[in-house]
Amino acid sequence: MYHQDFGNNTPEACIKCGECCRKNGPALHLDDLHLLRNKTLDRKDLLLLRRGEPAMDNVLGRPILLSRELIKIRSKNSDTTECIFLDPDSSLCTIHQMRPLECFLLECWNPGPLISKYQSGRLTRKEIFRPGSAMEELMCVYDEKCSVVEFSGLLQEEMESPDKNQDKIKAMLRYDLSFREIILEKTVAEKSELLFYFGRPLHELMEPLLDFLRQNPNNRHP
């Protein structure tokens, strides 16, 4: 959670400890679009989280199922939540002068400014890609065939009635991997960019989704 309890030693300015940067990378907003255009942020630096995907809500401090897609800065690797732009030696941000809106607003001792903007003006792929462009059409095809919401629903039914959806689940997983392979073969997209264009493969989302559904049995996918 972004808010920190400092007890009786609450700071009144950033003390450059880097703790907030170790907890989770920021989601991007429309105000951050210029950071992609001026190449401060590269597509390989970003991760798409799709509608229906479990994700940590930095304000609530707990996982939720996303009701809409968002784009965030990636973590350094799958074993950490540490932002890729955090310098491990100095605990400083390497793009501090051109940091995203959430980082600019973040005051760990005073979450008000961030909370006021947190859910508004989120950046999505439709603001980045021209309608009708080749990549936009590919993303639409993928989202239809590999919907996280549909996949989550199949998993939820499978938990309640084992073997009911095994074939459908396996078919979606196969299509997902095949689609990504074709993209790499037939387009100029690089492997490091696929997480930005299409998000994580369904096989990587299966366990997080199952864990969320087990822990939230009354939750309904959005």
Image: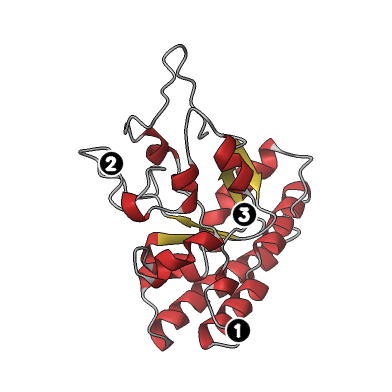
Q: Nearer the viewer, residue 167 or 173?
A: 173
Q: Could you say whether the residue bearing mark 1 is in a helix, strand or loop?
A: loop
Using residue 134 as the reference point, say whether residue 120 is left or right of it. right
Residue type at mark 1?
Pro
Judge from the rendering whether residue 107 lies leftward or rightward of residue 65; answer left or right: left
Nearer the viewer's eye, disc 2 or disc 3? Answer: 2
Q: Which mark is residue 131?
A: 1
Comparing 217 with 51, the one in front is 51
- Which residue occupies 49% across, 43% down? 105
* Mark before the other along the chain sequence, 3 or 1: 3
The residue sitting at 52% across, 33% down in the picture is 1
Quadrant of res 24 = top left
Vertically, is 74 above or below 41?
above
Are the residues tagged 2 and 1 within 8 Å (C-beta)? no
Q: Position of residue 114 (x, y in %)?
A: 55, 42
Residue tagged by mark 2?
Answer: 92
State whether residue 149 is above or below residue 191: above
Residue 197 marker: none
